[in-house]
Amino acid sequence: MDYAVTVDQLSKTFGTFTAVDHISLTVDYGEIFGFLGANGAGKTTAIRMLCGLLRPTSGTGTVNGFDVNRQYEKIKPSIGYMSQKFSLYGDLTGRENLRFYGAVYGLSNSRLKDRIAELTAMLELTEFIDRLTGPLPVGWRQRIALAAAIIHRPRIIFLDEPTGGVDPVFRRRFWEILYSLADEGVTLFVTTHYMDEAEFCRRISIMHQGKIVVMGPPRQLVAAHGLPNLQETFIHLIAERPVDG
Amino acid sequence: MGKVRWIIGKELRHILRDPRSLVIAIIMPIMMTLLYGYAINLDIKNIRLAVLDYDRTSASRDLAARFHHSAYFTRPLAEAALSDPEAALKRGDAHAVLIIQPGFAEALRDLAPYQLGLSLDGADANLSSAAAGYSNIIIRQFLADQLPDGATLPGVTLSQRVLYNPDLKSSHFFVPGLIAVILMMISALLTSITIAREKESGTMEQLLSAPVRSHQVILGKVIPYIGLALVDGILVLVIGVFHFGVPFAGSMALLTVFGLVYITAALSLGILISALVRTQQVAMMAALVVTVLPSVMLSGFIFDIKNMPPMLQAITYIVPARYFLLIIRGVMLKGSGLAVLWVQAATLIALTAVLLTAAAKRFKMKIG
């Protein structure tokens, strides 16, 4: 069957530092995949390779059927990427940001207009869409950044810590939106530090020092280690490992 | 090209909405031009010159009058009290002392060798070299007027003339130089800051995750600044020509072409810098040190390259402003064309080609 994402022995080294060390995984279409790991575990580097922003040192992978080593320019139009910092232009309004990114993805003016109206309704942005994004509260900026990442209706969305610094109410609402996207068949590849969020994922992987340590449905991982919850399991898996292990 | 247009539009919004960039782009060039024009007057006038006339003839009095009737020299306040030139200079009563020993009138009549004495206050080097220069001119004019037509003073072969800028007005020099500096500043400084800003805020990563090529990003980002640089160049030119009366003797088309070549060199430097740094702050410092400062200090704008130590002279060869300055001064003040300026033009083009290639390579690598 077709996979949204396949990764086989993918590695990335910077000089002598190995950021991503032979990771392998597959993600189904329509799946919410949680890509977990401590800070500096190599998550962002891995996502950048999958988004076509960085070339792998070795290994292979496909995103939407396109090769990450050779067809990265074809990957770009088919995916959405929401990076760690909500990458909006603070001196532009929400609408201007969306129009800009929409145009970069090649949307025509009329389609762009409809799409922005649709996203404004879906993400409840009516009140904020015509304000400069710079001074907006983080939660609203994050929603506009999500709108920018999905403006071209990508089949796969990569979200790198999309909820960092956002309050719990906003986080909950954000995940409801992600769920509704998944219901439409969109694949979500998400990194997070919040274990309650990780439990929303169908499957998760935990990364440590460039390697994937474990992978599977969250409940199954918790049960396998005999710990009370995912938080304890995560800490157990990360903290118990020697550095450079 | 559609995507480039959108990036240009976005970039223009950034410029228009950021009061700081507007100040740098529009207000600063105007301020600098007016400042250089009025406040920083490099023309040296009213040098206090004491004349010690031991000859006491009509010829010697005529010479002294020549000095004091020129705009450059004035009489010191207490000339009658002057007897010791050294003391006068030391006290600051005079900047220069002209000593006319007895025998001046006879020497003129007999065309005999004769030496006038000029003591200068070297503490102010600019002032004293200007005083020496002006004195030479006045003395030569005086001699030429005294002698019958066709006769020459024995031993005098040098004929000093000041061409193109006969009044030695510094505005004629600073306006072309200022254009070179401002074009460099707008092009290199602002582009490197705008690219670094996108890297710093993470929008560059977002942009590159979209189906847009790096050359489209670069084009979209530099085109507004090329426009801005041209507007600034014209602004300074207009103020210079119409307000300060700087001549424009040559071809506007030629100047525009080389202005664009020079802007390309500056943009390449800006892109190179932004490829090497991560933050706006560092980009700004690097651009100031690598592009703006050399354009001011090492281009011949303010300091004469011939008088620099060999090390610094060697560096000036890779400063694009050095070549552009000769081109713009040549075109504006002398009306020179390519026949005269081809060496500078060819060197500037070669230097620009090298910088552009390096910038393109470096930017691709960074993204790849």
Image (tube, helix red, strand yellow):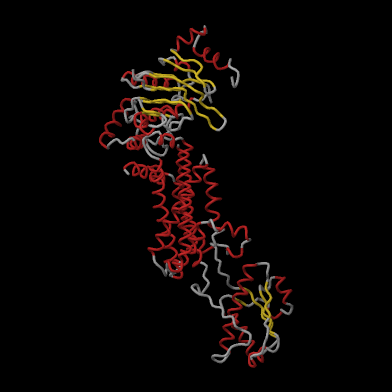
Q: Residue at x 42, y 68 (%)?
A: B337
Total labels: the figure holds 0
- In the rendered image, residue A177, in percent from the top left (x then y), is placed at 36, 21
Instruction: Name the quadrant of the C terminus of chain B.
Output: top left
| Towards the viewer: A103 or B94 | A103
- In the rendered image, residue A40, in percent from the top left (x then y), is placed at 53, 26
Q: Is residue A32 above or below residue A102?
A: above
Q: Is residue A168 left or right of residue B168?
A: left
| Towards the viewer: B334 or B81 | B334
Q: Residue at x 32, y 25 (%)?
A: A122
- In the rendered image, residue B270, in percent from the top left (x then y), is placed at 48, 48
Q: Is residue A227 above or below residue B234?
A: above
Residue found at the very far left of the displayed protein: A110
Q: Is residue A113 left or right of residue A229?
A: left
| Towards the viewer: B99 or A64 | A64
Q: Is residue B41 above or below residue A73?
A: below
Q: Is residue A204 above or below residue B270?
A: above
The quadrant where residue B293 appears: bottom right
Instruction: Name the quadrant of the N terminus of chain B.
Output: top left
- In the rendered image, residue B53, in percent from the top left (x then y), is placed at 68, 84
| Towards the viewer: B49 or B151 | B151
Q: Is residue A51 left or right of residue B130?
A: left
Q: Residue at x 52, y 67 (%)?
A: B170
The quadrant where residue B309 appears: bottom right
